[in-house]
Image (spheres, rainbow, N blue to C red):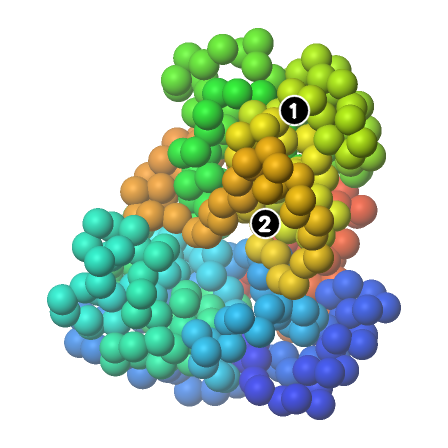
Amino acid sequence: MKALRFDRKPLRYAAAFVASSITPGRGGAWGPLELVDDDEIALPGPDWVRLTPRLSGICGSDLATIDARASRYFEPIVSFPFTPGHEVVATTPDGRRVVVVPVLSCVTRGIDPVCDMCAIDRINLCERVAFGHLQPGLQSGFCADTGGGWSTSMVAHPSQLVDVPDDLSDEAAVMIEPTACAVHAAERYTGHETVIIGAGTLGLLSLAAIAARRETDHADTKTPIIVTAKYAEQRRLAKLLGADIVCAPDELPRVARRVTGSMAVGNQLTNGVGQVVDCVGSSTSIEQALKIAAPGGDVLLVGMPAKVTLELTGLWHRETSIRGCYAYERADFDRAIDVIRRFDLGQLVSATYPLRDYRDALEHAASAGRRGAVKVAFDMRNEKRS
């Protein structure tokens, strides 16, 4: 099989960090990621299924790993060498088109009894991602025993498979997994004024999911959804997907002050926004979220952060909360399909690349916003498995 393989090679990892400091995404050219021809991965158990990936998206967490910028928090729950790719639409041996729920939870790992979180179907909070009959890995795409979507073959447990409806294209289907993340975040939508910081893939999908939730709940449309967007195409898509107000990041404090009728006191607003959804996860974005959040307000951290530096006095004084929002529950995939249909989210797949052009694909994904793109994916539909 052909696969993009990421191995533990410290010198090349350091080279990736230096290269990505110059050009984001360049870590794929200099780091420990290689296109290899190898034997197919053995099935971990008799009920496992071998999949042939069709499309597999490039996620921000993939880019952080390849550019040597991922948090060291993940080191104990990743096994090497691994093939990235957790946003996957694939074909089963019997010809079904499926998407993969990549979380490697207790059921997938053959653990019985399952942990407390898996027992209530909160697989995203599984407590056993380094145990069972699989090597460590919080998801397919970060585990040596499963492979990942950036390949012509990977394996999955039946509990991980969601059938793709016939009316969805492969491009729409590859958006199901990231949209499930957004749907999971939208479950915490409060109906208050809501700010979404960032209009990359995750920000736009969170917007679509929250707009769909507001429509379903018949929420008061007088409480606006505000989105920050850096680039013209992001602004156009944000309006298309349901944003009431779109502004540049540096305009957000003024817009939030006007919408909420607040006054500025130092770096804070007297009233502020009831809910802020941060889809960036940087020190700058989190600090901005805290500055515009209302007293007792909620900051939902959807974008994956690493190490950040924050001034938290305002959080303490105004009893603001920061809540992480990781991945999804199994039911979020069904809801994601509805959101994809509602907004035709397959249109967000801006470019696809064969595996051999992975360096170009990664650089494109890393500069997607500036280049007018959203989701960039690998296309294995014309690849030979061996």
Q: Secondary structure at mark 1?
A: loop
Kind of residue indicated by mark 2: Gly
Q: Residue furthest right?
A: 22
- Residue 89, how many percent across, how many down? 43, 55
Q: Up-down: is 95 above or below 33?
A: above
Which residue lies at the image location 71% right of the left edge and 17% below the top edge? 262
The crowd level at tag 2 (other Cα within 10 Å; few <14, some 14-19, many 20+) is many
Q: CA distance from mark 1 to mark 2?
A: 21 Å
User: Seen in the image, is 223 located left or right of residue 47?
Assistant: right
From the image, state whether disc 1 or disc 2 is nearer to you.
1
On the question of residue 179 being in view, the answer is no
Which residue is depicted at the point 40% across and 34% down?
187
Please name the residue shown 57% across and 9% down the image: 222
Q: Position of residue 171 (x, y in %)?
A: 52, 46
Residue at numbered disc 1: 272
68 and 3: which is toward the camera: 68
The picture quadrant where one finds residue 215 is top left
Q: Secondary structure at mark 2?
A: loop
Report the disc number at residue 89: none
Give left or right: position of 331 versus 179. Answer: left
Q: Picture coordinates of residue 145 (x, y %)?
A: 37, 79
Q: Which quadrant would residue 68 be assigned to in this image?
A: bottom right
Taking the view exactly as shown, the residue that stands out farthest to the front is: 317
In the rendered image, the vertical position of residue 339 relative to residue 279, given as above or below: above
Query: Residue at label 2?
Result: 303
